[in-house]
Image: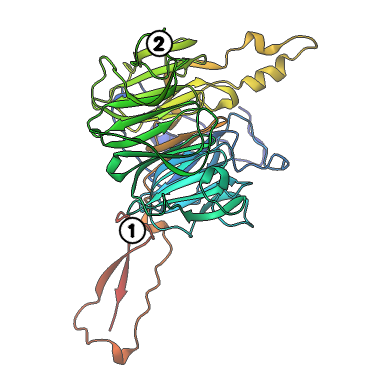
Amino acid sequence: MAASSNQPAYIWSKSTAYNAVNQVTVEAQPVITTGQIHRVPAYKDLRTVIYIWGDSPAANPADKSHAKADWEPTIYRQLPDIRIASVSCGPSYMMLLSSCHRLFALGRGDYGQLGLGASLRRVTVPTPISDIPTVTEVVCGEYHCVAIASGGSLFTWGRNDVAGHQEGFTTSSPKELVFMGSKTKCRSVSVNQTLTVCACDAGTSLYHWGFSFSGEKIQRPQLFYTFDQARIRQVALGKSFGLAVSDTGTVYGWGDRTYGELLGLGKKHESSYFMLPTLLKLRHVHSVVSVATGDRHALLLDESGKVWSMGENMYGQCGVPPCHHSSLLQIDFSDSSFPVSKIACGPRHSACINSGNQLFTWGNSAGHKLIFTSSVDMLVQQQRQPGVSAYSGLKNCCSHPQLIYALLHEKVACLGLAAGYTVVVTGEGIVPSEELPPTVVLVPDAEEMPSIEGTPRIRETPTNEEGSGEAYFPIQLFK
């Protein structure tokens, strides 16, 4: 390699002494070997970073000044000291829930889905929502958003015909929803585009509102179903079906099962639609911990860390070769040394995180939302010819979980999936103390201070509002 005349030329040698004299230094990430994927690495940076692959909900299509290659993620580093516990995604916006129960909005909400007031319909950085108490769970629909606050109270905002409020067309800030004239404690909630289902009364009752699977309009929360024995701890809605997981790990389902979304409800020639929750007889699956739903497919995570799939599989979103629908199958993670701990579904793609903080994705790859795939849109532009469909020779799916090697050096904390994008949050909200701004402490006047003898004492004060307890800035108090 030739060097310009005005720049020094460095020569790489096998001798480390020679290299030191000639000031040769190399900085790079460690090389990934097959042995490294079977153990948890020592993470060097635990600051929170938010990655979005695909069509970022915060992007402005009219602004070309920040255009990027479509395989590159949009990266947000505005919350380095905030530990994110969960992510929920709508088509045009997303919500980030911190470990200290604060809510942050990002994206566009034309119907007030951001919860930031009527005047703020788009934010390009994660923005805190102040008009709501501490939040324990949040879910995003297309036109509305729902959050459970501490104590079980429910708050909704967005378009009122699906949010459950009676006055006006939209509600642009979180507003508490009252059930049948009285407050009801909610345990779990889920939404699809227009329907909300909530498990209440210690999980014995299901309420719903919005537009049901059959198209019926339900303006305000109504009792949908009461369980005699089961106590529901999680509900999840697909496009036309619902699942509920009990405290004992059993699963109930209702709605449409045309694509095999509700296996274990009888023979194929029987009814394809079930009006009320019915126990699913899932062979080989014991004690389900959590479920995730796409448009017409579902993932089930059992207590041993195994993942099972069922439903539509046209894009391999069930983790097996594409077909019209898939029977209940265990997804193969034989290449991983860790059990799965978290699962997530987009409309037609899926992902999971294992206990080794590793990320896997599979299913529909359009828009590069599977992270590892080549850009179909880029290939189409290169091969476009008059009268020829470039899509005919391209595959835009992956039917087997793929490990995301690019994130092996980062601690993957949580993720969220939407139709056009994938969100991955890494880190634990820990910022090195030397990078933190100094903390200001108001000290009383000298006459109000007690007498202090000896050496200065040290008071350690948390440096961030989240109170993570991981980083402290020492403050010296003198007499």
Residue that mark 2 sits on: 270
Q: Is residue 17 left or right of residue 455?
A: right
Q: CA distance from mark 2 to mark 1?
A: 55 Å
The residue carrying pointer 2 sits among few (fewer than 14), some (14 to 19) or many (20 or more) residues within 10 Å by Cα, namely: few
Q: Position of residue 188 (x, y in %)?
A: 36, 41
The residue carrying pointer 1 sits among few (fewer than 14), some (14 to 19) or many (20 or more) residues within 10 Å by Cα, namely: some
Q: Residue at x 62, y 56 (%)?
A: 118
Asked if disc 2 and disc 1 are in contact, CB closer than 8 Å, the reply is no
Residue that mark 1 sits on: 467
User: Which amino acid type corresponds to the residue marked 2 in the rendered image?
Assistant: Glu
Q: Residue at x 40, y 42 (%)?
A: 86
Q: In which quadrant will I find the N terminus?
A: top right
Q: Which element type, helix, strand or loop, lies under badge 2?
A: loop
Residue 343, placed above or below residue 79: above
Residue 382, placed above or below residue 409: above
Q: Residue furthest left?
A: 454
Q: Position of residue 252 (x, y in %)?
A: 33, 26
Q: Position of residue 61 (x, y in %)?
A: 70, 39
Whether residue 114 is visible to the viewer of this picture, yes or no, is: yes
Q: Earlier in the sequence, mark 2 or mark 1?
A: 2
Q: Nearer the viewer, residue 297 or 453?
A: 297
Quarter of the figure with residue 161: top right
Q: Nearer the viewer, residue 376 or 146?
A: 146
Residue 153, placed above or below residue 291: below
Q: Nearer the viewer, residue 234 or 61?
A: 234
User: Which amino acid type corresponds to the residue marked 1 in the rendered image?
Assistant: Gly
Q: Which element type, helix, strand or loop, lies under badge 1?
A: loop
